Image (spheres, rainbow, N blue to C red):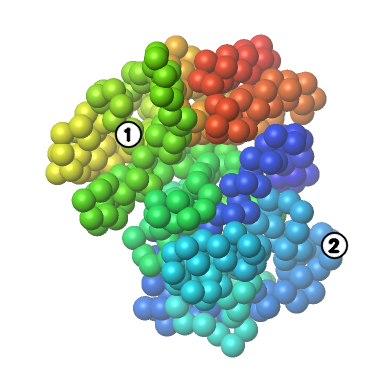
Amino acid sequence: MRGGGQAIIGRSALGGVLVALLLALLLGLPDLARSADAAGAQAAGRTYVGVASCAGSTCHGRMEADGKVVRQDELKLWQEPSTPGGAHSRAFAVLGGTRGRQIAATLGLGEATAAPACLGCHSTPAGARGPRFLAQDGVGCEGCHGAASGWIATHYAVGATHAANVVNGMTALDRPQVRAGVCLDCHFGSARPGQFVDHRMMAAGHPRVSFELDLFSTMQAHHNEDADYARRKGRTDSLKLWAVGQASAVERALTLYSSAKGSEGAFPEFYFFDCQSCHRRIYDQAERSKTWEANPGRPIPAGMPPFNDENMIMLSAAARVIAPGQAGRFDADSRAFHAALARDRPAAIAAGTRLAASARALADAFGAAAINGDMAFTLVAEVAGGAIAPRFTDYEGSVQAVMAVDTLLNSLVKSGRITIGAAAGIRADVNRAYAAVHEPNAYRPADFRAALASAARSIGALR
């Protein structure tokens, strides 16, 4: 459920394929703004007070959602052991599991549960820590909401406002760009210690990092969007959240690529490149077995590792619908960046800086735009349409595309454009698209494009 009792398909009827995908992404994964908050909180003298400080039965620790203002069972949802909604609370525990121990041993990190390279995302990255703060709580309340010492005693007082809480140090997660920055710290990476999953970590066994802001926010939601919530913070605009998330992810990727993290020794940092484009079967036989397709969005030589452009593809589709005046510039800058990768790193950094600026401009435009619910129909058609679909030649971009279609379908339900029953009726079509990206080693681009087109036609028929 998301908000005021409105059923959202992404939470209540995702289907086994989607749940499996999200669990794979969330359980083993960690999540520049949260780490920025940690640094900022330390500089401002704020203290992280710990999950236990929020867990009283008169606060967020009830077993039933019977609070008069907020649910008050938020801690129970955060700790839920069987759903993606409890993934943040499990983030520390996975470090002590078999996979976590194996990764740490391979990399020579010592105990994963004490390794700074792991704790930056598998625990709340905190500066000053109060006596009730425990790293083993995983990603706790303050990991997303900010160090609480400045606002914990006043945020529940009569007359308290969200604006006052933000002034006192609470993170303004109702602002799409702020939320995107917080989540991207770990669900993509930041420049701070312990918040970057490099290629060596993935080679040691860390899962591939993937993210989509609105869908993952839905899975992590521990609140109701009732009238009180709307009065204090406004209604969540799922379309805006999705679009801003795509733009922010592109900017983050290019900013980090252009930094010292973009290379390791004589090699590029392969984390930024599309994993499955290189990790394919190699055949030695009389005739070649071509395992890749040319991608019209990447003007690079055949056989060259491509930069992971999953968010660039989605951002191109979003720009065409929400900010068409800026779409041409973004597409040109995107192609120029890919082309520069074939020259040298200085050229790629310069082109990446321009592309990051284009993405940032789109994030600003999306944040200010009057986005209406009917745009979701147009966006679904755009994502699966002739201008964008030919770019789904690789696994990572295709995963991002099907998550986008699911998010856009959910937004249509939330905005009342289609009914819950109608959305449930086409769930099988969406699940077929998920099934087409369920197994990376079995990914077939043509099959995926056909499945995505079928799901898009089903959604379009409801218009």
Tag 1's secondary structure? Answer: loop
Give residue 372's position: percent from left, percent from top.
54, 28
Q: Nearer the viewer, residue 102 or 176?
A: 102
Q: Is residue 394 visible in this depiction of the protein?
A: yes
Q: Is residue 335 visible in this depiction of the protein?
A: no
Quadrant position of residue 59: bottom right
CA–CA distance in space, label 1 to label 2:
51 Å
Quadrant position of residue 157: bottom right
Quadrant position of residue 152: bottom right
Give residue 139's position: percent from left, percent from top.
58, 65
In primary-sequence order, the first of circles 1 and 2 is 2
Q: Nearer the viewer, residue 352 or 202?
A: 202
The residue tagged 2 is 64
Residue 419, above or below 121: above
Label 1 CA crowd tier, 10 Å (few <14, some 14–19, many 20+)? some
Q: Nearer the viewer, residue 70 or 93?
A: 93
Task: Give the amino acid type for the residue marked by disc 2 in the picture.
Answer: Glu
